Image (spheres, rainbow, N blue to C red):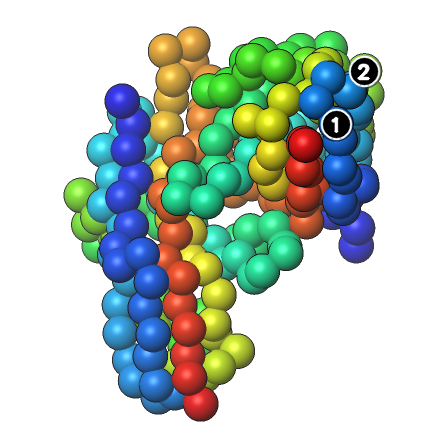
């Protein structure tokens, strides 16, 4: 069974305090990895796609990296507006050949001024 | 840019009632899907469509029906609402099998 596990479930940081979120996965027919940001009352908003081990993507204070077994979302000098739930998702192929996407539960990040 | 639009934003139903959650996208995406999001669980796939006229079941399809008569619209029908269907429902679309999903802002459904 495909699984995506995120840790920690919740993270509280002081403004400017850098940290990393982890996403580990076991997905058959893995075809890359997605990171999303979700604000309360909103749908997930796409951040990054990573396709191969060693790949890195950056956007403002966020940098996503990928290995063969896990991905990290590094947050450098976060600001209060970075507070959100960050979701990791792994696209794979089910038994019927459909490209399904398995989501983790997410890491709820709170950045305190 | 509208993207994926879901209506209504909130809905309260009594057990046994039926309703349709609406989803429309203006990106000409072939692939559309419905997810539910519950506390402590990741987004779970209910039904999906790979094009107009083609739908299939996802991980948690029981109690839900879908149809896809146009590329733009993908409604989700609750046949006889149950308290276990209390959740937040998200519609998503993508242009190709390897593209990331684009989500709507969800419908929060409460069944009493």
What subunit carries mark 2?
A: B
Find residue B112 and report its horizontal and vertical position in percent. 68, 32
Going 46% across and 44% down the picture, which residue do you hit? Answer: B39
Residue toward you, B102 or A8: A8
Image-quadrant location for residue B31: top right
Pointer 1 and pointer 2 on the same chain: yes
Label 1 or label 2, whichever comes before in sequence order: 1
Q: Which mark is residue B14?
A: 1
Q: Is residue B53 left or right of residue A28?
A: right
Work out which quarter of the rendered image holds the N terminus of chain A and state it: top left
Q: Is residue B30 above or below residue A37?
A: above
Decide: marks 1, 2 in contact (CB < 8 A)? no
Q: Which residue is depicted at the point 63% across and 55% down?
A: A42
Secondary structure type for disc 2: loop
Is B51 placed left or right of A79 in the picture?
right
Q: Quadrant of residue B47?
A: top right
Q: Position of residue B98 (x, y in %)?
A: 48, 34
- Above or below for A82 versus A22: below
Image quadrant containing the C terminus of chain A = bottom left
Q: Measuring 26% from the left and 68% from the top, which residue is drawn there?
A: A20
Residue A59 percent location from the top left of the image:
45, 70
Along the line of sight, which residue is nearer the eye, A101 or B29? A101
The image's mark for residue B69 is 2
Q: Residues within 10 Å of mark 1 (few under 14, many from 20)?
A: few
Q: Position of residue A103 (x, y in %)?
A: 40, 39
- Disc number at residue A44? none
Question: Is B13 placed left or right of A48 in the picture?
Answer: right
Q: Is residue A107 visible?
A: yes
Element type at mark 1: loop
């Amino acid at each position: 069974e495909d699984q995506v596990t995120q840790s920690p479930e919740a993270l509280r940081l002081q403004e400017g305090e850098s940290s990393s979120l982890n996403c580990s996965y076991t997905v058959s027919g893995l075809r890359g990895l997605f990171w999303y940001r979700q604000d309360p009352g909103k749908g997930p908003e796409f951040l990054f796609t990573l396709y191969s081990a060693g790949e890195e993507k950056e956007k403002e204070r966020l940098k996503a990296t990928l290995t063969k077994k896990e991905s990290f979302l590094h947050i450098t000098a976060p600001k209060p507006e970075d507070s959100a739930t960050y979701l990791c998702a792994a696209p794979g192929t089910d038994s019927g050949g459909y490209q399904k996407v398995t989501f983790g539960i997410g890491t709820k990040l709170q950045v305190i001024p | 840019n509208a993207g994926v639009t879901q209506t209504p934003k909130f809905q309260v139903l009594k057990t046994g009632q039926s309703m349709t959650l609406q989803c429309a996208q203006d990106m000409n995406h072939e692939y559309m899907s419905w997810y539910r999001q519950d506390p402590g669980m990741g987004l779970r796939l209910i039904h999906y469509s790979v094009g107009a006229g083609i739908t299939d079941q996802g991980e948690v399809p029981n109690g839900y029906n879908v149809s896809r008569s146009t590329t733009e619209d993908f409604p989700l029908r609750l046949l006889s609402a149950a308290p276990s269907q209390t959740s937040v429902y998200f519609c998503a679309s993508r242009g190709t099998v390897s593209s990331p999903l684009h989500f709507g802002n969800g419908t929060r459904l409460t069944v009493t």
